[in-house]
Image: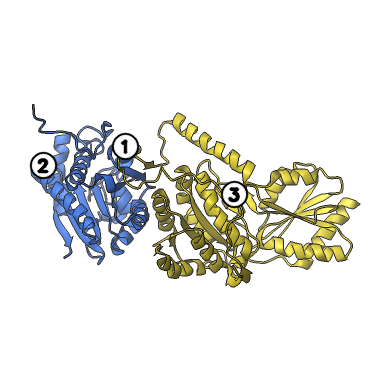
Amino acid sequence: MTKVFTRPKSLTDKPFHYCPGCTHGIVHRLVAEAIDELGIRERTIGVAPVGCAVFAYKYFNCDMQEAAHGRAPAVATGIKRVLPDRVVFTYQGDGDLAAIGTAEIVHAATRGENITVIFINNAIYGMTGGQMAPTTLIGQVTTTTPYGRDPGKAGYPIRMSEMLATLEGSAYIERVSVHDIKHINQAKRAIKKAFETQLAGKGFSMVEVLSTCPTNWGMTPVEALKWLEQNMIPYYPLGVKKEGK
Amino acid sequence: MSKVLMKGNEAIAEAAIQAGCRYFFGYPITPQNEIPAYMAKRLPEVGGCFIQAESEVSAINMVYGAAGAGARVMTSSSSPGISLKQEGLSYIAGAELPCVVVNMVRGGPGLGGIQPAQSDYFQATKGGGHGDYHLVVLAPSTIQEAVDLVMEGFDIADQYRNPVMILGDGMLGQMMEPVEFRPLSSKRELPPKTWATTGYTGDRPRNIINSLFIDPQALEEHVKRIYRKYEEIKKKEVKVECYNCEDAEIIVAAYGTTARIVKSVIQKAKREGMNVGLIRPISLWPFPTSTFEEWAQREHVKAFMSVEMSMGQMVEDVRLSVNGRKPVYFYGRTGGMVPEPNAILSEIKKVIGGVSR
């Protein structure tokens, strides 16, 4: 019998620890498929974040470094400068990248650091139990915005892709979603393109992936996908935000 | 090789390059700015790479990444900046990565001042960041010694897979002395960096640089293994100078710049008929505990006195080592004030007067 579907080589056989319905698993798979298709697994080094994906080093079947909270772009910079012919990527959530690691991501981008960043935006802190993220929508209820996010007190959700797209060093930035098959396919193309950008030596590349957190949103997986489509996409418009020559 | 006249900070930077350091990540802060400037100029000449990071936090995490990729790498800063690097140092120690970190100490706390101080002793020797760990801390008192210790520091870091700190001060960084860049006298067997993340090609297990151990039993085992390494470091890497201790009535403990001043005080005391010795810890961690123990047991030694550019930090380790055998006194200046020889001498006289009465 012919095998028509299998685990990508760039994923280990370790079962994911993610909650039922969480989209991290989908995105892990897309990253692994992109690495497989480009044939770069043996020269790829990944950097795991702090947050739900903290154990990413167990799942990606390549050499990995585990960074402190928010510092993945700095760690990736250190690796890439020592090993410029290797492919270096970070995998970061919204608390990691858009709050505590704001300085690291902005300056990695503005240096045109030739790395690829996979940015998971699910509008909440998952690992710590559902606190407000910088990307939490106005009115969204979290454990630290129990009355809904009030911009008068907690400010506004941050659009990282648009912000980083203003920087000269950014070569390719796209926001995608994984709420249905069509968008998952689009996300895969974007992730692959981000790695190709790095392989071509064009500079900083990032794919922001709108994702769900059914557990901390208090929804079923299906409701969460719907909520993403109806609430996140209007505030975080999909598409290419920056593309160099 | 002949001697060259160099500023402390620049000599330290050149020593790093001579030791094979090819990566430097830093952030401006006085009084260590000549180190990154020298590196920015020299590293491209030797095929290396310099980055001025957006913060000390970022710089130390670049060090983490580069060290994890198998490179010899250094960063430098001064007190407030070193505080910012503590998170990264804890992770580096936890992930067992080798690197060299230079702290040209200035007065604190807070923004403090920019003049020389030794008030980061606790931070340097007791951990500094969170968790159970130690840096190897080396404190030169001349620029030649700084050069030698930087070069050996890279070897120590590689041998034990542990960060090494060079603890200087603003005085050492800014002054000029003749130095010689010479090969290390002791050759170490350095283990190959088979653990580095250079790409998983299948000829070895997958390499993961990490300090996360979610299972408490595994974390305890990991920390205990690191501490077994520290026991070996304590046995093999203590560096100390004993100066004029034979027949000394009082022994002064001092390191770095302060030890230089104390040496001239000792000459002055001798001319006045007093026998004063100096124990100069060169490795602040591991601390030369047994040296203090030994001298504390000598009959002729009546007392110890720790002289520091702080409100009294190393004196705690001196007291622990002397362990009640003899009285331990303290004299210090802080905030960037350097102790004057006459002031130290009069403190010594007070102690001699007190203990011989």
* Location of residue B2 (image quadrant): bottom right
Say which element carries label 1: helix
Query: x%, y% of residue A207?
Result: 21, 52
The mark found on residue B321 in the picture is none
The residue that mark 2 highlights is A180
> For this view, does B280 lie left or right of residue A184?
right
The chain drawn in blue is A
Q: Which of B196 and B300 is in front in this view?
A: B196
Q: Residue at x 80, y 62 (%)?
A: B266
| A73 lies above or below A111 | above
Give left or right: position of B164 versus B62.
right
- Which lettered chain is shown in yellow? B
| 1 and 3 marks in contact (CB < 8 Å) | no
Q: Mark 2 lies on which chain?
A: A
Same-chain check, marks 1 and 3: no
Residue A58 got which mark? 1
- Alpha carbons under labels 1 and 3: distance apart: 34 Å
Residue at left offset 35%, top offset 48%: B198
Horizontal side of B206 relative to B268 (left or right) equals left
| Residue B350 left/right relative to B214 | right
Indicate the secondary structure of the residue bearing disc 2. loop
Q: How crowded is mark 1: few (under 14 residues within 10 Å), some or many (20 or more)?
A: many
Residue type at the position of mark 3:
Thr
Q: Quadrant of residue A6?
A: top left
Residue at which label 3 appears: B125
- Mark 1 or mark 2: whose residue is earlier in sequence: 1
Cα separation between marks 2 and 3:
55 Å
Measured in 3D between alpha carbons, the distance from the residue under mark 1 to the one under mark 2, in whole angstroms, is: 27 Å
The answer to whether any part of residue B128 appears in the image is no
Contact between labelled residues 2 and 1, with CB atoms less than 8 Å apart: no
